Amino acid sequence: CLRISLSLFAPHREHTHRKTDRNRATEVIHVPEQRAEGQNLALEPMELPQSEHMDPGKGPSACSAQTHFLRDLLRSLAPEENSNCRRGQFFQDGQRKVDYILTYPIKKSSEGFMLRKTAFRRTLRRARGQPEPDRDGAEDETDHHEQQKREKRQQFESSLMEMGLELERDEQTRTPGLGFLKVHAPWSVLCREAEFLKLKMPTRKVYEVKSHGGLKEKLSSTLNRITAPLQLEEKFDASDRDSFFDSKTRSSLVLEILKRTKCTKAPFSMGITSLLGSGVYQAAYPLHDGDVDGENVELNDRKLLYEEWACYSVFYKYQPISLIRKYFGEKIGLYFAWLGVYTQMLIPASVVGVLVFLYGCVTVDDDIPSMEICEGRRNITMCPVCDRVCGYWSLSSACATARASHLFDNPATVLFSVFMALWAAFFMEHWKRRQMRLNYEWDLTGFEDEEVEKEKLTCRDRFPAYMTNVIMILLMVGVTFAFVFGVILYRISTQAALSLSSDPLTRSNVHLTVRTTAAVINLIIILILDELYGALARWLTVMEVPKTEKSFEERLIFKTFILKFFNAFTPIIYIAFFRGRLGGRPGSYLYVFESYRMEECAHGGCLMELCIQLSITMLGKQLIQNNLFEIGIPKLKKLIRFIKSKRSSFQEPKHEQKLQRYETDHFLEPFAGLTPEYMEMMIQFGFVTLFVASFPLAPLFALLNNIIEIRLDAKKFLTELRRPDAARGKDIGIWYNILRGVAKLAVIINAFVISFTSDFIPRLVYQSMFSPDGSMHGFVNHTLSFFNVTHFQNGTGPLQPLNLGYSVSICRYKDYREPPWSLTPYEISKEFWAVLAARLAFVIIFQNLVMLMSDVVDWIIPDIPKDISVRMQREKILMMELFMKEERGKVTHLPEMAHTLEGNHVLLPLHPHQDRETTLQLSPCGGFV
């Protein structure tokens, strides 16, 4: 094969012949910068002698192409890279590093296979007598559009060269129909852009002297050696121009140039973003720092991260946040730092939750209400749970449900709810302190986002979009409620159908079957609607035309969170607060569509069913949506792209070639932002805090998921996604406000769950007001009302009234109502009002007390760590003294002041045309240039 590569930055006509590795068997030629308009940049591949690309003694095989295709298809999930050739990450000269890649479509009109395919189709049409289709107009129009794109690319690339960038093409790759433009930024351009963006580059390492303490410090140091992340010795050599700017910084500087370079041939075009949207370029991405596995792979940051961060064998270690920030940028580094703090804080919450669950297991045999329900001698006959097909049932048959409900409905859950509210406050304060420390260490304390407004629209211009947003959000919330109502109808109808079954085992497990299948159906609906709501939120945000990119991101996040929050928690809210309270009473039930009776809670309450719904939804979203989809979908998309590429090229004699670095990265999934990662953690935080009173094991499940999630995300970022563009940021943005809102809402919801869903308040009221001896004996009988079976409405009584073996005249149901023999039969009793007053009082007291405690925690713990505050203040004072002395002309004392400066935040101008040694002499403080 003969490849021609164009070096656009060559100052003169140059012919360089270089022999590459045997696997590619190519010869590289650099052609001059001046060329004719529209000249093809790549020659057609030429057949080499058989001895040069075939093993001796082996002839061509008829199925060799299919064999290679299947082999490459099996390896498509991990495309092979040529690790022995540096040209994957360097220009053809092997010296200039590739800082960025632009891909664009190319049309190969002279491919023999396509010509033979077209001629064969034309022959078939003539043999069948079919007329030739008239495609000249369509082809001319397509060629015109392609010509326009080529002109735009040429003009844009000329502008890039004027900015000082150096470019090189590669159109003879294993990816047919796609050309790669390699971009390199020389030292002068990097220095110019760094000064323009006011970057702070370190010139020396600051060492901190620590004093050795006693036994406590030794134990702490031993534990730190076990759990500490990878620590690399940082060496900053300002004289080495190749390593002074790391790959992340180089690509971010090049991206800034690409964003602000205009293309005059494209109207309203501003930078690479517009060209990508119009299809002039297909993709733009920086390269990964090499491979992560294989033989003789050079050590690089990507490989280090894979071994010390993405492997499951290092799950017990802290994350190498500094190396993550160095490779991916500050925003991604802050995300993984936040995820690490959140996972760390889940450890005490999980321990306390397990203790609460164990307390319920230990005390279940001593729970008097459960003992009364399970006692068969009482022989309490309960009213039917549905009309006609359901019969009377004995209260003792609900023994298992009552005992299981005690595991989650016990006095310890109240204390656990208070603990989780304080835990949320401690977590947010801990994160603020950690974030401030990272801002100081990463030199982000003075960083501010500078954004330009896109379009200036008036309120009248935006009013239709705002109204559309409100209407669509309300409509989607209504759709969510409609699906919940559909699941309710499923439970009612399925329960009635299973009750008619002739199988005794089926009839005995009706409640468990209905609850479990309904929870699974809810989970499937949630997963489907999540994808729909994400696309809808983006469409609504685009319609608003926000002023800046930050405003666009915040509005998109807010809409997506609102829709997904209602989608995930609406079924749970219905079970917790509405089920069993809208059904009415025997003889006066509430019906839906005049035929379906509203469902009721079991005698043990709805807390057990709430726990089942929470566990299935939480575990299902984490296992299916968060873990399986995160890895499965990128792999599937990469496989599809690889198959499409092979389908077009398996006739070409290039199977023995290995992929270059930029080709391998092309098959990876593009980075879609951190919004999906944060969103799944926000929903999980809601599961952990909102209904924790009914499910104390939620923090434990979240902890186990996050231990896997960290390593799964790490592997995804390193091996399944293209390298993201490094973005700077000093905080997690709107996500912190969402955390605070969920934490405040959790206090209110847990107060209502304890008071209205659980039996904690009724038991407390009975024990203090109605119990004759101050114990819980007689509580079950106190909560059951009487009903005369002769008062059933026509056609609603059981078809088999003697199913228990005896005639029933009075049945019981759970409610606080007057008996049928009173003067006001079936009216609400005074016990109901006493319990309701106690419930409302508990909500008010619990909410205000817990929020007050959370505010006290927020007030006591400072947002900035003391050592960081002292160092920042001292640096500020020393900097002022340094500038004052410089103004007075005391230049000779500058080195002495520099040695007393502990920090490393001095910002001095870096002149690209000035000698580096001279620049360092102007920076005696050794801080940042």
Image (cartoon, rainbow, N blue to C red):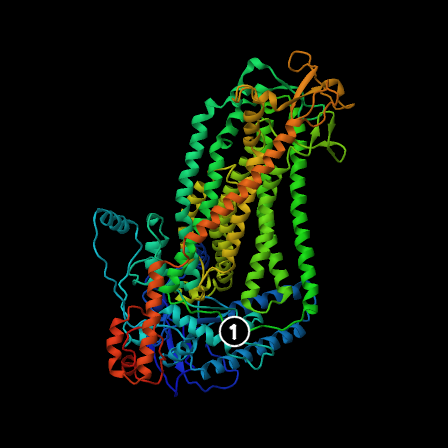
In this rendering, position of residue 423 left or right of residue 462: left
State the residue in front, 186 or 482.
482
Is residue 274 left or right of 127 when viewed as pictured?
A: left
- Image quadrant of residue 266? bottom right
**Vertical comparison of 471 with 415: above or below:** below
* Disc 1 element: helix
The percent position of residue 757, horizontal first and vertical second, equals: 58, 34
The residue lying at 26 percent from left, 51 percent from top is 225
- Dot 1 amino acid type: Ile
> Is residue 894 toward the left or the right of residue 534 in the image?
left
Residue 246 drawn at (x, y percent): 35, 70
Where does residue 86 sit, x and y in percent of width and height?
Answer: 33, 69
Residue in the image at 46% along x and 72% along y = 255
Residue 840 located left or right of residue 313: right
Residue 664 visible in this rendered orientation of the protein: no
Residue under numbered circle 1:
272
Depth check: give the residue in front, 813 or 255.
Answer: 813
Q: Is residue 658 above or below residue 280?
A: above
Q: Nearer the viewer, residue 46 or 496?
A: 496
**Quadrant containing the N terminus in the rendered view:** bottom left
Which residue sits at x=64%, y=35%? Answer: 579
Extreme-top residue of the structure:
806
For the C terminus, the quadrant is bottom left
Q: Is 313 above or below relative to 324?
A: above
* Count of all numbered marks drawn on residues in the image: 1
Q: Nearer the viewer, residue 827 or 730?
A: 827
Q: Position of residue 507 (x, y in %)?
A: 61, 23
Q: Residue furthest right?
A: 794
Residue 869 showing in the rendered view: yes
Q: Residues within 10 Å of mark 1 (few under 14, many from 20)?
A: many
